[in-house]
RNA sequence: GCGCCUGUAGCUCAGUAGGAUAGAGCAGCUGCCUUCUAAGCAGCGGGCCGGGGGUUCGAAUCCCUCCAGGCGCGCCA
């Protein structure tokens, strides 16, 4: 009972913390302070209790206070009376046009539009957000380097990459890691297949043509089936595993060749989606540098794990789990080898800089001007360091929740409570395949699997849509559209645009679902370019940009001169008709919520909201675009004002698209 | 058995730190291209928010319970 109560208290304090963070959004924060200041003379209210929410309708104002309701309850009076009095107290607030009482006791605030727009326009490039961490590590992708990437991996990478982008936008220092399990059983399976089934020599392997990842995809499923059918082969596989872990030739050479080549393929796939990394820590380096030994010593010394001499788990080192009194998690097996979780605890310690040891690094690839570093178990001569974050996000699907909990427990048991609290499992649901998608990829299914309406992606069974296949199909479709609409463009320009469109389609598709929602992948849906899709967002931006381009062509002004002209302009909003005034305001106020959306996305790790926000913004922009012509407007003053309005919207849209990792083509 | 998640329009999903009339997209139907790109816009139809209780001025949102589904709970990784 007592602990339950404590847990509740803890939750409440966490929630308060989040509330404060989210409403950091400048205008609201300033307003909340001022409101609290005015009201506290009459009632006992603090800034934290001032909850400013959006109104359901533009006619009701821009922001609403609902504090009259709880206050009325406390004071046992009518909320309407309180609201009326509050409205009096708040009269003449700076930045506020007027205040009205509505409904049962809502206090509705109408912002001073002229003032608001001027201010927001001037601060277009300042987010108004502040970093809170020393260094944040985002670990994502983490694909076993033994086969082609599939759409399940894409979801992981898109979520992780978007999180990193949002954190950077907030001003945080972010390090993106992609962990490579280059000595694990999945790689072992493929090495087994190459040696025992395919009888490939290392030289033959090196000469193998393109699509090595596709080749391994098929080989991996073949090996899985072979091993299931030939139990006796298990000992050979175990032997290979051991040799790879100890770096013995030639098995370890096979493993290295396979994992590096597949890793190259994965990076190339992710690059198509604008996703990149800072560092690739490898399991082989962890083994070579004996990270586990260090962690093991510490875990033993602190009593975080202990030895069992009798019972079911006799001979094992185990860890107690909070809240599961009679259950123990085995960390070291009775044969002395460490389990997956054990290694993960050591690795997590490294991420926080708590291991007292770092990898060596060397360049693995370059991505534009950015070097992607890979870990090494031996000195390389490069003086670079990674890890040592103050906060760590592990992007891993929901099935790993239990193990992630154990890892956090490991940190806690070692006394690292703060790090445990900042060790965040960013979990999300899996990607499955719809019945039609299953029919699309030719794959043998068991009778049991055939009966289900959808199937979980499985590399082992070969059930999955390969990432490159999906992107290829999207590019192909985009290219056909681009060629139809812009026949004057040369081939390379058309291809470039198609790549950008395909990338946007994938990224939006992966982000539009809430993370707890199981995505049942369907080709028809993923290949759609209309409605709530990435290409729709791009199209919106392209059309706006086209207005600026045409304006510049007509007037001969440069982009800077154009910006200077509209920044200088000072249009009096009262000159607008009521309809245009409303449409202008709806667009501007909605767009200005971008900061709050980013903070919300980070706090809840829910990027579907940010995706939705961007989509809704585009809907508003398209509505405006359709209704108000800019370039043909005869009234020069009004024309400049409209240019300013869409410039504002366009800038914010670009910011949002950047966060979603969506590029804007020059033409579509 | 225990734990986590999910159930909202014909379909796919938003909305869940309680707030005013439950929203999009797709699919269907009606209009709009001598006009800044129709990958667009405007409009129509479509809902016991899984069922039942409770808390509250107010519940899709919080609590209890039941029903249905998914996923975890290895000396696998």
Image: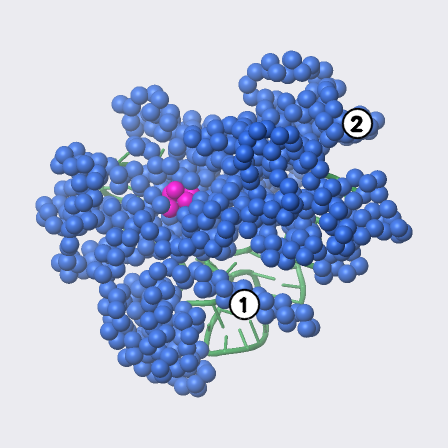
Chain colours: A blue, B green
Crowd around label 2: few <14 · some 14–19 · many ≥20 (10 Å)? some
Residue A116 screen position, x and y as percent: 25, 60
The answer to whether one can see residue A114 in this image is yes
Tag 1 residue: A13
- What subunit carries mark 2? A
Q: CA distance from mark 1 to mark 2?
A: 53 Å
Q: Main secondary structure of the magenta part?
A: helix
Q: In the picture shown, does residue A285 fall above or below A53?
A: above
Magenta-colored span: A656-660
Residue A352 in the magenta stretch? The answer is no
Decide which of B16, A664 is in the foreground and name it: A664
Query: In the displayed structure, does residue A340 sit left or right of residue B45?
Result: right
Decide which of A365, A210 is in the foreground and name it: A365
Q: In the picture shown, does residue A26 fall above or below A197?
A: below
Instruction: Residue at 48% x, 28% y: name it.
Output: A366
Crowd around label 1: few <14 · some 14–19 · many ≥20 (10 Å)? few
Instruction: Residue at 74% x, 29% y: name it.
Output: A246
Which mark, residue A394?
none
Residue A38 screen position, x and y as percent: 33, 77
Tag 2 residue: A239
Query: In the displayed structure, does residue A278 sit left or right of residue A101?
Result: right
Residue A252 screen position, x and y as percent: 70, 24
Residue A112 screen position, x and y as percent: 24, 64
Secondary structure at numbered mark 2: helix
Q: In the picture shown, does residue A162 fall above or below A597?
A: above
Instruction: Residue at 33% x, 46% y: name it.
Output: A653
Q: Quadrant of the C terminus of chain A?
A: top left
């Amino acid at each position: 009972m007592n602990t339950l109560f404590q847990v509740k208290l803890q939750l409440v304090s966490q929630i308060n913390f989040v509330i404060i963070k989210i409403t950091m959004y400048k205008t609201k924060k300033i307003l909340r302070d001022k409101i609290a200041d005015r009201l506290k003379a009459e009632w006992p209210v603090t800034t934290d209790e001032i909850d400013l929410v959006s109104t359901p309708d533009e006619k009701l104002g821009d922001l609403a206070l609902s504090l009259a309701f709880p206050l009325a309850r406390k004071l046992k009076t009518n909320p309407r009376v309180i609201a009326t009095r509050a409205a009096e107290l708040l009269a003449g607030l700076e930045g506020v046009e007027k205040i009205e009482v509505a409904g049962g006791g809502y206090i509705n605030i109408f912002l001073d539009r002229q003032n608001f727009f001027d201010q927001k326009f001037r601060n277009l490039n300042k987010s108004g957000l502040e970093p809170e961490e020393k260094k944040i590590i985002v670990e994502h992708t983490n694909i076993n380097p033994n086969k082609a990437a599939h759409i399940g991996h894409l979801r992981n990478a898109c979520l992780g990459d978007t999180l990193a982008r949002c954190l950077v936008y907030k001003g945080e220092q972010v390090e993106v890691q992609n962990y490579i399990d280059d000595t694990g059983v999945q790689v072992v399976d493929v090495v087994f297949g190459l040696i025992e089934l395919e009888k490939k020599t290392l030289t033959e392997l090196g000469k193998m043509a393109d699509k090595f990842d596709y080749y391994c995809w098929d080989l991996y499923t073949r090996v899985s089936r072979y091993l299931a059918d030939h139990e006796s082969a298990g000992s050979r596989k175990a032997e290979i595993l051991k040799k790879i872990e100890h770096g013995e030739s030639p098995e370890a050479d096979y493993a290295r060749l396979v994992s590096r080549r597949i890793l190259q393929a994965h990076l190339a796939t992710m690059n198509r989606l604008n996703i990149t990394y800072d560092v690739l820590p490898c399991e082989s380096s962890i083994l070579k540098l004996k990270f586990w030994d260090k962690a093991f010593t510490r875990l033993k010394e602190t009593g975080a794990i202990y030895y069992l001499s009798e019972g079911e788990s006799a001979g094992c080192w185990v860890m107690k789990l909070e809240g599961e009194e009679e259950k123990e998690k085995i960390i070291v097996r009775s044969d002395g080898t460490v389990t997956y979780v054990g290694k993960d605890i050591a690795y997590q310690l490294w991420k926080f800089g708590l291991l007292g040891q770092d990898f060596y690094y060397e360049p693995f690839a370059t991505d534009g001007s950015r070097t992607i570093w890979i870990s090494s178990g031996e000195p390389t001569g490069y003086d670079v360091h990674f890890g040592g974050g103050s906060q760590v996000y592990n992007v891993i699907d929901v099935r790993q929740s239990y193990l992630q909990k154990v890892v956090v427990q490991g940190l806690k048991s070692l006394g690292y409570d703060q790090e445990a609290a900042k060790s965040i499992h960013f979990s999300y649901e899996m990607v499955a395949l719809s019945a039609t998608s299953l029919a699309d990829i030719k794959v043998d299914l068991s009778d049991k699997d055939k009966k289900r309406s959808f199937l979980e992606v499985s590399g082992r069974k070969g059930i999955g849509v390969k990432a490159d296949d999906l992107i290829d199909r999207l590019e192909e479709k985009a290219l056909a559209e681009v060629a139809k609409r812009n026949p004057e463009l040369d081939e390379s320009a058309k291809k470039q645009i198609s790549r950008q469109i395909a990338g946007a389609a994938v990224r939006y598709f992966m982000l539009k679902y809430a993370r707890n929602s199981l995505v049942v992948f369907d080709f028809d849906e993923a290949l759609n370019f209309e409605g709530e899709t990435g290409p729709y967002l791009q199209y919106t931006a392209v059309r706006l940009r086209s207005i600026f381009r045409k304006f510049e062509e007509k007037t001969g002004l440069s982009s800077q001169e154009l910006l200077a002209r509209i920044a200088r302009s000072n249009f009096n909003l009262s000159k607008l008709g009521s309809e245009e005034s409303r449409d202008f305001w709806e667009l501007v106020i909605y767009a200005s919520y971008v900061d709050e959306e980013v903070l919300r996305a980070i706090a809840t790790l829910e990027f579907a909201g940010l995706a939705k926000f961007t989509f809704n913004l585009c809907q508003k922009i398209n509505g405006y675009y359709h209704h108000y012509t800019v370039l043909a407007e005869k009234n020069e003053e009004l024309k400049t004002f409209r240019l300013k309005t869409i410039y504002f919207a366009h800038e914010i849209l670009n910011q949002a698209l950047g966060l979603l990792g969506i590029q804007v083509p020059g033409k579509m």
